[in-house]
Amino acid sequence: MRLEEQLSLEMPEEARIVRDYLDASMKPDPDLAATFVADNVVITFTGGRVFKHPSGPTAFNAGRYSWVKKKMDTFDVATNGKRTVVYSVGTLYGEWPDGTPFEGNRYVDRFEVEDGKIVRMDVWNDSAERILTRMGIKA
């Protein structure tokens, strides 16, 4: 058995749901991603943008990047009864709209999973900071 398959078997079910959702989102295939979310999902994206379907972040990302993918490093899982919280932490890599490649852009995604479906997702990443740096604005 490959190491990736073994690690997948050891993941809690909720972490596998989140990983599969993120994999579908990166294709990008928002319709496949939607199979992992509840009908009433709330996705709060960077900048406080709220979406009700995975197609919202896909459309937003199409304007922000030529393409973008996630290198998922860790999944942290906490359960408080019927709802499970899953954090996916890693880095983004891809190309800006002008074709300039980037990597190492930190992200944290927080998910709430209930009854086998994602009911809430909150997204944070360093893209805005990197865009400011590219514009010559330094803190």
Image: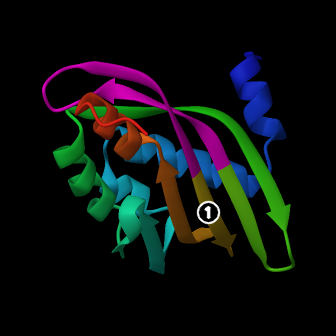
What segment is highlighted magenta in the picture? Answer: 88-108
- Seen from the viewer's position, the closer of residues 54 and 65 is 65
- Residue lying farthest left? 98
Placement of 67 over or under 51, stated as above or below: above
Q: Position of residue 37 (x, y in %)?
A: 50, 68
Placement of 28 over or under 36, stated as above or below: above
Say which amino acid is labelled 1.
Answer: Phe
Q: Give the image quarter of residue 92.
A: top left
Which residue in the protein does label 1 denote? Answer: 111
The colour scheme used here is rainbow
- Residue lying farthest front? 139
Q: Secondary structure at mark 1?
A: strand
Residue at the image position 26 percent from the left and 30 percent from the top: 136
Lateral position of residue 18 relative to residue 60, left or right: right
Q: Position of residue 137 (x, y in %)?
A: 30, 37
Asked whether residue 33 is in view, the answer is yes
Lateral position of residue 15 relative to residue 31, left or right: right
Residue at the image position 71 percent from the left and 26 percent from the top: 5
